[in-house]
Amino acid sequence: MTVPASSANIGPGFDCLAVALDLPFHLDVGEPRGEAAKLDDNHPATKSFMSGGGQGPLFGETLIPPGKGLGFSGAARVAGLAAASLQRSGSIHFADLLARSGELEGHSDNVAASIFGGVTATHESSIIRLKCPSQLDAVVWIPDGKTSTDSSRNQLPTSVSFEVATQALGRSSVLVAAIASGDLAVMRQCCVDDLHQPKRLAASPESARALRIALENGASAAWLSGSGPTIAAFIRSGEAEQLSQVLPDSGHSKILKVAPYGIYVS
């Protein structure tokens, strides 16, 4: 079973807008294939597998770095729950998978992208899947440090002003429409966040610098991926390599494709 990574909180889409990226998480049940290592009982895939009634050893390998804001735990939990469902019933019930993995993760944006692929907009049990404009790649800048999602979330304000809230609603609505229609100029204008990024970027100045550099070098959108510290950007495929070379050398860059499909069972 293979599940893609995700980058959530695209612009103003806090806890609701995410994209699947072609960094895979592989999970095998019973016996490993290739170089997959046995997962211990504390691994998020194992915990979700057991919570879903799965039995037997798990083996996994992944290119998703943990603690970087690229949906490692979400992909692992999706894989574990899906594997348990297949083992028990021979099928995957996607609505249930979304609900249960979102409950384990604490929010559904990451897991929705990993389950369904493409760009996903979620609210509670509702999900809309968008096709990312085909001319875009994703560039991610990954610094050396890690971020605890729980710790980072606890630092966020408990309320915002009416003006900030309405600005976020307007931007997120137009951003989704711009992605769906392929309007790159409007994507750039509306991929702005005042809900969580200012607080988190203040604690990670190199991430703030990487975001600024991405926008200065042709990105159609750039955002703090999840709770960070990774920065993600959409950019035209022909400009991705140039952008990756000018991002801060305090981290490393990857040029990724948007994963058009989510969970895959072989």
Image (cartoon, helix red, strand yellow):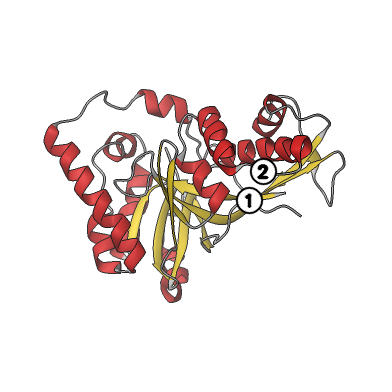
The span from disc 1 to disc 2 (Cα, nearest Å) is: 10 Å
Q: Nearer the viewer, residue 217 or 108?
A: 108
> Horizontally, is 125 left or right of 22 in the view?
left
Res 206 seen here: yes
x then y, percent, for residue 86: 74, 41
Against 156, is 259 above or below?
A: below
* Residue furthest out toward the left: 163
Q: Can you tell which mark lies on residue 263? A: 1
Q: Which kind of residue does numbered mark 2 sit on? A: Ile
The image's mark for residue 92 is 2
> 179 above or below 134?
above
Q: Residue at x 26, y 51 (%)?
A: 173
Q: Nearer the viewer, residue 34 or 239?
A: 34
Q: Residues within 10 Å of mark 1 (few under 14, many from 20)?
A: many
Residue 25 image point, x, y percent: 66, 47
Q: Nearer the viewer, mark 1 or mark 2?
A: 2
Q: Is residue 208 above or below residue 218?
A: above
Residue type for callout 1: Ile
Q: Is residue 169 left or right of residue 259?
A: left
Among all residues in the image, which is located at the extreme bottom?
238
27 lies left or right of 239? right
* Residue 241, image x, y percentages: 47, 70
Compared to residue 41, the image places residue 99 above or below, namely below
Provide the secondary structure element on which disc 1 rests.
loop
